[in-house]
Image (cartoon, rainbow, N blue to C red):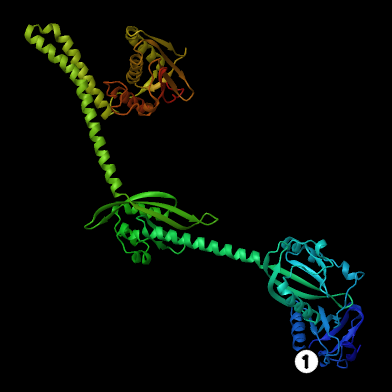
Amino acid sequence: MKNKELFQANKGGYLYMVLHIDSGHYCMVASDEKESLRFPSSLDDSVYDSAHFKDIPLFIERVRNAHGGEEFVPFSVRGRDDSKCPMYVENFERIDEQHVLLRAIPIRKEPIEIGPDSPSTTWSSPFFEFMDEAAVLLRTNGEVMKINLSFTKEYGWTEDDLVGGILPYVPKDLQEEFEVTRNRLLAGERKIVLETVRLKKNGTRVPVSIRAYPVYDSEGHLAAAAAMIVSKESAANTQSLIQLQERIIKDRDQLIVDIMENTDLGVGQYDFIHHRFVYLSPAIKSLFEVELNEIYADCMAFQKHIHPDDKGNMVEALCNPGSGEMEYRIMVPGKGLKWLRTKSVPICNSEGRILRLIGFTQDITKQKFSEEVNLKWEKLGMVGHLAAGIAHEVRNPLTSVKGFMQLMDETDSAGTYIDIVMDQLDRIEQIVDELLMLAEPHQGDEMRAADLKRVLLEVSRVLRAEARMHNCEIRFRVPDTELPAICKMDEIKHVIINLVKNSIEAMPDGGTIHLAAWNSGEGPVVEVSDEGIGIPEERLPRLGEPFYSNKEKGTGMGLMKSFKIIERHGGTIEFESEEGKGTTARIRLPRVKESTPL
């Protein structure tokens, strides 16, 4: 096929042309099969001589770009004589370094009406059907051939509503615009982009962007026009939402800045990657008595006035960052001592590496002062209670001694009252010994292996008579075998006697006291339970505190001493109680090695 035939009105299908890129020489081939290809020579015609001079630059650009590896973009090219039919080059294939294979469709200028029996009426494409954009296929006379699912979803009409009719989504005031666009496609324009307005089925007008293209049939005839319609309604809503979110974020950020800039709480953010502070709130200056610029320039400048005794802890905290709190002192000449508390919160990456550390610092000087005052008052109160307890305990035997000494003076019969005076003096000595034991609990004999069963039997014998005097009965339950424990027998006996006496006093109308012991596997257990008035639940945690007692005239020294003794033995005392039903005291001591002799 020669030059004069290339741009003739070809009624056939595709045209296949092998092209030499540099010279433009071409030869026509029967198909795109490689076996039938023939390469052009200098004797063949050049497309650059037969194409319209205005289309040659586009021709060269598209072919060279595709040959160089870019995506091929279809284009049309006219013959040198406008009376000749143009070609639409729609496919490209690289053959070698110099040659390419082009596939083109001859374009007829006159519109072709497609009848109902035309194959184009059954045109279908999965891409057209399921693309996200709304799309419509129109005949050259403007009738609807096909719409896709996205068109129905976006605008409301179904295919049954529209096929064979004129598109109702064009507003009346824009009908002329629609006709102009259709005629431009019929005239040969390859792509039209239009920003306009269209109607939904419910009458709503929406802004849209339309891209319209010509569609050719297998014979190269202009068969239809395809339009893709992008609604800008959702884009406008999305943009509004983005702007709203940006405004919210901006307002939130400004709110945070306003809070940080106007609070007494000092906030600092330290960058562990670059080892510098990236943010310091104004309060940092007054808290640390250091200019912010100094800290920005030297990250350690904030330690300028930290108390020497606290600097070590501060350095350790920076070297081993993590969540936590620390309290430290600031000393500024002429301004006195200031207490600060800093809470640290690390910011880590996905691997757990600390990137930044945020510190929140507050002045707790007033709080510390209040704590110190309260502690002093508490100590003074303890001293007062201690003095009252000692005075109460010592005054009774002293009163007796004083009275008997007066009787001795009046009757001059010393022998009668000597024994009584000595007993009271022994009582005073015992009280003093108890106070010394509390102050120096490790004095005395060493602990030895003993049988707790024997200790309980002695306690039962000693207190049985006193229990009967108060209408109380002591019931005894111990194992048949020995119950070994490492202890001081006299001290353990003192603790158990104190607990049993408390039980007797808790049952003014009489009752039963259960005294039991067993080996729990973790060590010996001694239990004293009664049927007394019980102890309020809120008071149980305070049992054993210095000078705390449930008795009206008690000082709490008995239980305090018992707790000290058991604590020194490495054991514990537990209390369970229910008001109106009674109290159980349970002593747990450490386990004894099997090889320990009793």
Image location (x, y in percent) of residue 327? 34, 49
As drawn, 482 above or below 251 = above
The image quadrant of residue 173 is bottom right
Can you see residue 70? Answer: no
In this view of the protein, can residue 432 be seen by the observer? yes
Classify mark 1: helix, strand or loop. Answer: loop
Residue 18 on image: x %, y %: 85, 84
Q: Is residue 178 left or right of residue 285?
A: right
Q: Quadrant of residue 407?
A: top left
Please tell me which residue is depicted at 43% across the width and 21% down the height of the picture: 525
In the picture shown, does residue 44 fall above or below 454? below
Residue 487 vertical position relative to residue 135 in the rendered view, above or below = above
Q: Residues within 10 Å of mark 1 (few under 14, many from 20)?
A: some
The quadrant the N terminus occupies is bottom right
The image quarter in which residue 469 lies? top left
In the image, what residue type sits under mark 1?
A: Phe
Determine the residue positioned at 37% across, 67% down: 297
Locate residue 558 relative to residue 194 in the image: left or right: left
Q: Nearer the viewer, residue 109 or 309?
A: 109
On screen, 259 above or below 42? above
Q: Which image quarter holds the C terminus? A: top left
Report which residue position mark 1 lands on.
53
Front residue of 367 and 515: 367
Q: Position of residue 273 (x, y in %)?
A: 47, 62
